[in-house]
Image (spheres, coloured by chain):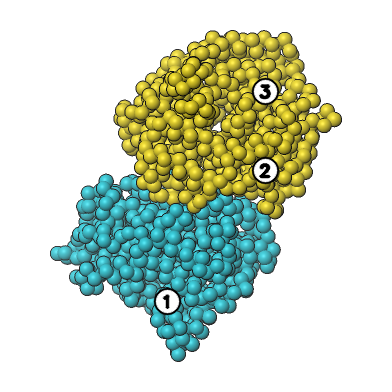
Chain colours: A cyan, B yellow
Amino acid sequence: MWFIRVNMTDRTAKVEEAPAAYKHLAGRALTSTVVAEEVPPQAHALGPNNKLVFSTGFTTGTSAPTSSRLSIGGKSPLTGGIKEANAGTPWARDLAVMRIRAVIIEGQPAEQDKWWCISISMKDGKPAVEFYDATEYAGAGKSLYDVYPAMQAKLPEGANLGGIGVAGELGYPNSGIVFNDMHGRPSRYAGRGGLGAVLGSKRVKFISILSTGAPGVEIVDKALFEEGRKKMIEGLRSHAITKPKGGLNSYGTAVLINILNEAGGLPTRNFSSGRFEGAPRIAGEAIFESNKTRMGKEVYNHACSPGCIIQCSNTVYAKDGSEITSCVEYESDWSLGANCGIDDLDAIAHMNTLCNAYGLDTIEAGVTIGVAMQAGVIPFGDKEGAINLLHEMGKGTPLGRILGAGAAVTAKVYGVVRAPVVKGQAMPAYEPRAVKGIGITYATSTMGADHTAGYTICPEILGVMGKQDPLSPEGKAALSRAFQATTAFIDSSGHCLFIAFAILDIPSAYQGMIDEANGVLGTHWVAEDVIKYGSEVLRKERAFNEAAGIGKEADRVPEFMKTEPLPPHNQVFDVPDSALDSVYGDL
Amino acid sequence: MWFIRVNMTDRTAKVEEAPAAYKHLAGRALTSTVVAEEVPPQAHALGPNNKLVFSTGFTTGTSAPTSSRLSIGGKSPLTGGIKEANAGTPWARDLAVMRIRAVIIEGQPAEQDKWWCISISMKDGKPAVEFYDATEYAGAGKSLYDVYPAMQAKLPEGANLGGIGVAGELGYPNSGIVFNDMHGRPSRYAGRGGLGAVLGSKRVKFISILSTGAPGVEIVDKALFEEGRKKMIEGLRSHAITKPKGGLNSYGTAVLINILNEAGGLPTRNFSSGRFEGAPRIAGEAIFESNKTRMGKEVYNHACSPGCIIQCSNTVYAKDGSEITSCVEYESDWSLGANCGIDDLDAIAHMNTLCNAYGLDTIEAGVTIGVAMQAGVIPFGDKEGAINLLHEMGKGTPLGRILGAGAAVTAKVYGVVRAPVVKGQAMPAYEPRAVKGIGITYATSTMGADHTAGYTICPEILGVMGKQDPLSPEGKAALSRAFQATTAFIDSSGHCLFIAFAILDIPSAYQGMIDEANGVLGTHWVAEDVIKYGSEVLRKERAFNEAAGIGKEADRVPEFMKTEPLPPHNQVFDVPDSALDSVYGDL
């Protein structure tokens, strides 16, 4: 396995053997380890001492289903803490089959006049790195939908492309790193925490990868791996949420809109209610019906990355049958919709495209617009106004820069008390006052408010792993902790988090995940090792944060959620601090 | 002694006996104690659960010299921690002679449509509170130089006035609370940490006070007090810095410009050098000479508040003999001048007036403009551009709001790595790399970067208390700690910090400070009690900060000061973290 170290101070690259000590580290476990070991916790996130680490999971690049996730780590300019964001993309598969365990981007050029494309391909049986001038593709106002294909046209056929939009160029704390999907769209985002700005601070606009001539992933025990992968496939194909023409394949992740709305946990108008009267008009079912009407047939969703059998990515079509966007995730649908009081699906799809065009995280963008609406910059429900705010971000005007700095900064700039953030990161699409366990995850995650860090929605809302009362705080700290540790393992396996629905309900699928890992790595892990492995990842992340000044007192939801009852259940967030502290207390 | 609790939720006020347990607490000791005991550390600074506490020192209102300081405490919207800011003003004297130990402003109205003036006066031998509608005096773009006299005209003759400018109304993290000086100018600021926005969040525009009929301060042991006050006067009148026509009385605090420049510790162009070629043109001596030329005579400085015998407040006169501003402190002269690469005294004086007009802290404003210059918003040295940026803040445009949020937020919004802040608060006029002790104070103070919290400049630069090498970190942690504790006592005594020059060099003056306190309070404190008392204040402040999520990892200067050598000495900030941690380690 290879480690590629790219030094942007002098534009050099070293291709080295991956350190033996890291043998079993991949994906998030590896990115977080390298960041924890090599980035000074007090380093400025946009300074030369921050690093950006790319790594795929153990099983990425194999025939394991739904395993083409790429993990990216670094110090976050949004939270000031450690950050791992991941995305599903063919780019991940390429990295894995080239046996590149990590790409580490370091330093930054003294001259800030040019932008670069880092190009990785095979040369003489080994990965090699070149640098191309990408200056012409950068600049305020430019859309990735324009410059992405222009850059791609200059690269060899078959290359996959990652990069940043204007948001990353301008150093916005809200800026993601984008990768193409299976159809070349610049739409698969490692979106959260501003890692796009970190790449931008190193003057990297694009990273292309071409795996022609790659040897493929080495599998130590092929039979065991094969056994595991079959169990996993069986699980995914039989679970109601993940099976073909099941919930996700039919309605996408936006299937959750109606479900959360019903549960009173769909944050509406900057987290002032848990129920949105316009929910049915923006729900996954509405997208499906609209597409059916407009396309004259039922349109099921597609895969974002190679080997995915869940296939949850939707496309939203316009009346004339043209594509407005692909895809609108639940989180984006909610943040740009319900959270802004907007119930117009086409407008939401358009906003989604603008986020992709400018390189913005949709969650942070929608919550920020919600805060701006709370401040009176534009009224709730004003879709033209919201679209205009996204263009302001793309242009880099003073107003756009405020919004590009994210929800916490926007609230500070406008004196808004009701800022739904933890550790400076915007809360996603589940109301902590209506779903207590996810609130604990938001509060305590090393990542800031992040639903993917410990998705207790499974038992609290979806009945996966049994059903637990979402309004009760009882036992939820332990639940969140178990989810956070398991997630850290899944994020290291290369699998999409959506395998969780199947593996938590179907024991053989869970065993399949472990068999796959043991098959690839030659390890002998059992179920407890999943938690052990994940906990070790969390420990490293937590230690980094503490050294960066983010301790347990930062593991809190904002004050207004503890004092302001949320309709319709009229609940406050009543999880005691001691329960929050117990999550990482003796990890 | 009275406690006045004003509840802005329902506009009511209670006048109560001051709690017996607080008998010996006054000034900063009292404001920090009330904040620590009554404000939840996780409360939003602009929410209804923050409080604003006003208290004068033990000796305020007596004939003790230079003792009319008012201390204001609350949770800071700038730092997120506890905040004490103080100002010298006749308003303080009035509060003290009315035997009001504290005014505590709580709650906030549900309706945000009106602004209020709280009016405090004597009624039936007791303080009483009324509320006036002050809505007409508020509004973006309005200058305090216009609305202040308009409000004053409606109040009884002899009333003194405190309040906020547009900055506080708009909720800027950079917003001070202003009080009139001896000549009625709205120019004496409790400037740092955004307490203006806290007052604004409670919809209070002004607080007037009228002491007619007040009983005066009770003094337990008059003879002892008299003895102490004489020692203090003697000390202040004989020390070179504080004596009549001495350094401060002749050149104002701006006498430090040439001294710090000579020492290589005058931060220039956003802390990129310790020496400014334009220093002689903006120094206190230059102000004195310019005034002499323009007024045809030597103009010595005046007192900001009753009973001050140091009299360090200057007035800057225009060519036509009219007043441009009063007064330009060293910090303002530096921040709006050297730190922005501006060497035009009249322009600096004009900018100082604009800060006063809009209710901005001059230090935060100048450092923020320096960061904006670093970002390329305007070039260094652009005085017209800098004046325009202050007007943007006054108008509340998006750009103005960014800048009004202070240097740390401006840096975050523009992706500027070189942000000279600690705990979100801008560094004052002394370079930590050239004066290591003050860097330790900046790093460790409970207030964020604050020179007044532990002014080690005394021995490091001025030779007060002997001379110590400013470039050496040796012994400076203990030095800073001793200064921080002593300062907390001085800030509780009601004296201006400038008594420090005399009391640290002249033992009888130090004893005078203690005698005054014992005389007023009937205590039997000795020298060690000063440190003990001050340390207890610091402990409370520190505990509040820790509970608010600001622990020892926040006691650091920004990374660039540890890696970027500062001309002319080419030093980095080389104080080890262990030394920083020792300051509060076992306090």
For the point 40% across and 81% down, which residue is it?
A: A322
Q: Which mark is residue A425?
A: none
The residue lying toward the viewer, choosing from A199 and B359, is B359
Calculate the distance from the C-alpha at mark 2 to the C-alpha at mark 3: 25 Å
Q: Which mark is residue B204?
A: 2
Screen quadrant of the N terminus of chain A? bottom left
Q: Amino acid at mark 2?
A: Val
Nearest to the eye among marks 2 and 1: give it.
2
Q: Are marks 2 and 3 in contact (CB under 8 Å)?
A: no
Q: Report helix, strand or loop for mark 1.
A: strand
Tell me: A18 left or right of B235: left
Q: Amino acid at mark 1?
A: Ile
For the point 42% across and 76% down, which residue is it?
A: A324
Q: Mark 1 sits on what residue?
A: A324
Where residue A289 appears, x then y in whole percent? Answer: 51, 84
Where residue B467 appears, x then y in whole percent? Answer: 42, 16
Task: Answer with the quarter of the image where residue B429 lies.
Answer: top left
Q: Report helix, strand or loop for mark 2.
A: strand
| Number of other residues with Cα within 10 Å of mark 1, as a class: few under 14, some 14 to 19, many 20 or more | many
For the point 47% across and 71% down, which residue is it?
A: A329
Total marks shown come to: 3
| Number of other residues with Cα within 10 Å of mark 3, as a class: few under 14, some 14 to 19, many 20 or more | many
Q: Chain of mark 1?
A: A
Tell me: A215 left or right of A495: left
Q: Chain of mark 2?
A: B
For the point 72% across and 37% down, which residue is it?
A: B154
Calculate the distance from the C-alpha at mark 3 to the C-alpha at mark 1: 69 Å
Q: Are marks 2 and 1 on the same chain?
A: no
- Judge whether residue B311 can be spotted in this image: yes
Q: Report helix, strand or loop for mark 3.
A: loop
Q: Mark 3 sits on what residue?
A: B60
